[in-house]
Amino acid sequence: MAPNHATVILGAGIIGVSTAYYLCQHEDGSSIHLVEPSPELFSSASGYAGGFLAKDWFAPSVSELGALSFEEHRRLAKEHGGREKWGYSPTTSVSYAASAAARDSQRRGDDWLRDGTSRADAAPGIPDSRSGMTPTWLRRLEGDHIELISDKDATAQVDPLLLCRFLLQECIKRGVQLHQPAKPIAIRTDGNGELAGIRIADTRSSAQTELPCARLIIAAGCWTGQVFRTLFPESALELPIKSLAGHSLVLKSPRWHAGLESNGCHAVYTTYKDAFCPEMFARLGGHIYFAGLNSAALPLPDAAAGKATPYRESLERLRQAAVELLGAGSGAENDLEIVREGLCFRPVTPWGTPIVSRIRDCDLGAGTVTRSGAGGVFVAAGHGPWGIALSLGTGLVLAEMVQGRKLSADISGLAFDGDRARLFAN
């Protein structure tokens, strides 16, 4: 492919590397550029997310993409040894209430973003009880209640950091070029006003480089709106992608049973003292991801700052909840080992579903256009807590969109609508 038909992807997180992975299946990898400002790869949501996958927990506009992505996760794991390389495992998902009173007061609902409720209510639910649905590492109390909400055919688990590393390695093997740490400075247009390239700067030395391209994909997570505004300052569009910060712990418990979990992991959704809704995901190898303490109020750090520093108070709240839910019991010494602490920033839209869309030339501002049939500016961001789950489907469909191929899923409901954005802004 000629250099002026090249593709630049801004953001080398899970969405960016997934898109590059599927693009390079159908074109020369050397024509694809990944640009990432952070000095540490996968230092936000892509590396610090839970890695929970669901097939049918999505709103209608996302349902086909969700099902496609789930099957892509399963296919890649089967073809590339995903169980061994990135901990892919079918998962039994349950809702847990410590008592009948707690069960009656659980604040469950699919409006988790606005009300702090559990996203588990988005699951279709399974009415009957089945053996093996209770994990060995969850502390059980008299009168508590376990409800099966998804079985191993509809939910799964991965270690997202290992998956991201696999995808990036595959991209680089095919010639995809990684520019990191580097940030976008400005676009370049030719004499006809067509997008012809983008200028980037090394965040350590400030040395600038120009990358020729006709296609630009912005997949910069919470920073997507900032990137778009930098590159297209004359545009009247605002991409309303904000951040939802989430703290997490990765734990080891002596009650994690290798024999049971080796046949499929567990995901547990519950509430903690009516304060927040913990999510617990067991991973192959003995680690338990513990999260659910989220905030839209934490300031978004600079994209080039690297890994965020967690707030000690929030980590302590998580630790206390983990001890009560996973610990050895009242009066016993805490025997949970904290393996890792984390804070990540997940990109969210006001309406709760992602944007996977081409931006119309008329919305780029200042007469900027893209090459007919070979160019375009695209956005893929705002996946909320489903970035890992929807990553492969998003990458596949976005690659098809960019390359002009038939789409594998209907994503018409995820097209960017400036009118809807303005409505939510007001």
Image (cartoon, rainbow, N blue to C red):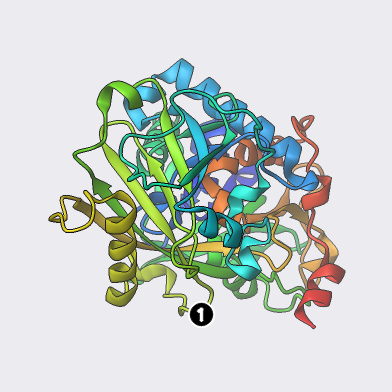
Residue extending furthest toward the left: 333
406 vs 154, left or right, is right
Question: Percent from the top left, x then y, of residue 81?
Answer: 39, 19
Above or below, comparing residue 240 to residue 401 in the picture: below
Give residue 105's quadrant in the image.
Answer: bottom right
Q: Quadrant of residue 123?
A: top right
> Where is 419 relative to 217, above or below?
below
Quadrant where the N terminus sits is: top right
Is residue 31 in sight in this rendering? no
* Residue pointed to by mark 1: 297
Q: Give coordinates of residue 120: x percent, y percent.
A: 59, 48
Is residue 143 at all visible to an observer of this figure? Answer: yes
Q: Is residue 42 left or right of residue 4?
A: left
Say which of 211 and 190 sits in front. Answer: 211
**SS at badge 1:** loop
Q: Is residue 380 left or right of residue 301?
A: right
Residue 142, position as x, y percentages in the image: 39, 46
Q: Identify the amino acid type marked 1.
A: Ala
Q: Residue furthest bottom?
A: 426
* x 45%, y 35%: residue: 157
Q: Nearer the viewer, residue 368 or 299?
A: 299
- In the image, taking residue 363 as reference, residue 169 lies left or right, namely left
Q: Residue at x 75, y 75 (%)?
A: 235
